[in-house]
Image (tube, rainbow, N blue to C red):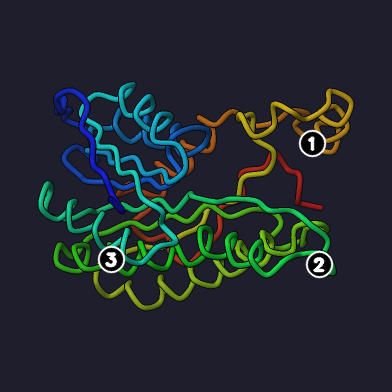
Amino acid sequence: MLFEPRWSGVIVGMDLELSGKRALVTGASRGIGFAVAKRLAAEGVRVALNAGHSRKRLDAAVGRIEGALGCFADVGDPKAVDEMFRTLKTEWGGIDILVNNAAVTRDSLVMMLQPEAWREVLDVSLNGAYLCARAGLRSMIGSRWGRIVNVVSPAAFLGKPGAANYAAAKAGLVALTKTLAAESARHGITANAVCPGWVDTELVTDLAEEARSQEAARIPMGRFADPDEIADAIAFLASERARYVTGTTLVVDGGLTMR
């Protein structure tokens, strides 16, 4: 099966600004994606968590958020994305908020970077965002309200030696964000990007302590971000408070790239 939905618990209604909205967060089984899903759920949003690599990890994440829907699907696969959105249409009537966070890394210097590794990273990080945005826009346009938030990286602006595929995907995502903003503004939809720097997630647990200290020393605030701090920024862009913010990139990196 390309896509398999799983439910957890009963939706708990909350009388908050975003209460009753419907959100899909990709790459949500851990790290930033899970923090975003948890934060939106706390705001009364019905949340669908997507992941495409570990069903076990996704099920565990879904089980930690009451009323969450698990969407196991490869966002780089057009058929899997279409099936996922058909289920969201059936269950909820569509979505109002889309957070494109899914990403993979296959690092290598350009001269040794295999075409398969290039394609895989772009398929998930860039093509996946395009496929989910294209599908999600249908219900957003019908509602005359929507929020798209794409998670990018300093690599989009600075490049990343040894990870040209990742840097190219994230740079493309910035351009996609601006184009989505220009095309959808008249429908009451905003599109923005959030650019985290170093974040304390499972992905940096293998970083040697010396390397971690060196990287933290480069950050004016002197530490890595907590995933919840990135989730705060994304929740803001998903809210009515950001209704006049579109086509921009909010950098949340403790000052790392300001110089």
**Residue 94, x across and y down, in percent:** 17, 55
Residue topped by disc 2: 110
Of labels 2 and 3, earlier in sequence is 2
The mark found on residue 135 in the picture is 3
Task: Mark 1: give few (<14), some (14-19) or many (20+) Cα within 10 Å.
Answer: few
Q: Earlier in the sequence, mark 2 or mark 1?
A: 2
Q: Residue at x 32, y 59 (%)?
A: 80
Whether residue 45 appears in this view of the structure is no
Q: Is residue 102 positioned above or below 44 on the image?
A: below
Q: CA distance from mark 2 to mark 1?
A: 31 Å
Q: Which amino acid does the dot numbered 2 rest on?
A: Val
The residue pinned by badge 1 equals 220
Left or right placement of residue 183 versus residue 31 in this view = left
Q: Against 152, is 32 above or below?
A: above
Element type where label 1 sits in the image? loop
Amino acid on which the number 1 mark rests in the picture: Pro
